[in-house]
Image (tube, grey):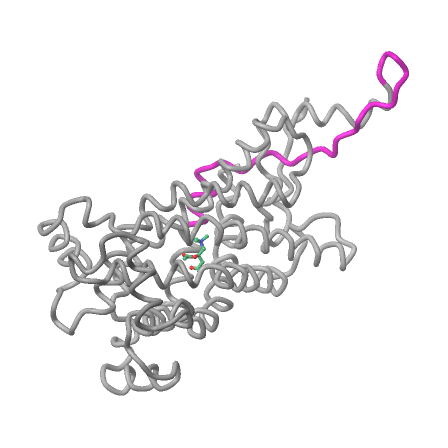
Amino acid sequence: MAPHKSSSSSVPFTANSNNTMSDFQSEASDLLPSMSSNVAGEPSRTVKPQPKPDSMLKSFLAGGVGGVCVVLVGHPLDLIKVRMQTGVGGSVLGMFADTFRQHGIRGLYRGVSAPLIGVSPIFALSFWGYDVGQRFVRWSTGHEGELTLTHKCIAGGLSAIPTTIVMAPVERIKCLLQTSSAGQYKGFSDCAASVYRSGGVTSLYRGTILTLLRDGPGSVAWFGMYEFTKKAMMQAQGMEDTSQLSPIAVLTAGGLAGIANWSIAIPPDVLKSRFQSAPDGTYKNIADVYRQLVQKEGHGALFAGLRPAMLRAFPANAACFMGMEVARKALSFMD
Ligand SMILES: CC(=O)O[C@H](CC(=O)[O-])C[N+](C)(C)C
């Protein structure tokens, strides 16, 4: 049989959605459309041939590029979000202007070393985990052909498990850097070393469950919305494949994915930021973070930072998915 060629190499943007079948499944499904009935004369199920899956290394590398894009576009607003969540008052614009006036562009990118070092692997793991998740769903359900949106949402949720292993300590250091006074830490490694010296790995991993509570549902919404929007736009334009979508369509799907993620992620994110940036001994456990927050500041405090998070969500995630798709295309020699 002629080698099955992925459609990704001939189109501007490669969709990630249905590239996860094993080679065996992909080749087997090639045979099926030609069979219209089985031996008993009953019509047999025909399965749309699937493109060869992308290599998982390619998903990992393309996801890493997406991560760099998300940080470069989204960091200044992320900084303001964390400050608002940890008790610094003011409007988004006011805080933006004040930071810029006092510290210039460097001030807006304060603490960027942590996400730049950490976010690339996190997004690499996220896209890799999504691929693995789709393969797992296919294997556990025996589903052939294109996965449904529900399958993809489950795969998205599963992607949060490997992601959290890196995300939790990186977020801990990022929150400390973003809320510390100027000069308290020299940078990412200084802060990480100081946390490790004072409390070991346990301290570095403070906030892991809250990170998972934020990113499990968030990833379901993130990948689900990206796939849903791409498919809707593909159908609206009478296209055969999401890989035919324009850059504007990819940017729109990515931006909406970010909005979907942050529409549900803010309350656990607030609790996580509080927990991770508080001095040792402030909280007994996660429930205590919630109790103290609601008691002192009311339920509204659970939505602190919603505005900067939402302002950041669209451009940062549009850039992320665009960077990921461009990198995937550039890495098509790995197919
Ligand atoms: C919290 C976070 O990193 O969310 C990602 C989107 C964003 O705006 O950074 C999504 N995901 C957790 C799936 C990587």
Q: Front-most of 314 and 237?
A: 314
Q: Front-most of 133 and 242?
A: 133
Q: Residue furthest left?
A: 197
Please report the residue visible at 55 percent of the width from the left and 41 percent of the height from the top: 154
Q: Residue furthest top?
A: 39
Residue 254 horizontal/vertical position (percent): 55, 60
For residue 32: magenta?
Answer: no
For residue 41: magenta?
Answer: yes
Residue 239 horizontal/vertical position (percent): 75, 53
Q: Residue furthest front?
A: 295
Magenta extent: 38-63
On the rendered structure, is 177 left or right of 259? left
Residue 211 horizontal/vertical position (percent): 36, 52
On the rendered structure, is 45 left or right of 207? right
Q: Front-most of 33 and 309?
A: 309
Which of the 4 quarters of the picture holds residue 178?
Answer: bottom left
Q: Main secondary structure of the magenta part?
A: loop
Please report the residue visible at 54 percent of the width from the left and 64 percent of the height from the top: 255
What quarter of the picture does the N terminus occupy? top right
Which of the 4 quarters of the picture holds residue 85?
Answer: bottom left
Asked if residue 63 is positioned above or below residue 105 in the image, the reply reads above
Asked if residue 242 is positioned above or below residue 265 in the image, the reply reads above
Quadrant where ligand 1 appears:
bottom left
Please report the residue visible at 50 percent of the width from the left and 59 percent of the height from the top: 261
On the rendered structure, is 95 left or right of 221? left
Please report the residue visible at 88 percent of the width from the left and 19 percent of the height from the top: 42
Number of marks in the image?
0
Residue 259 horizontal/vertical position (percent): 53, 64
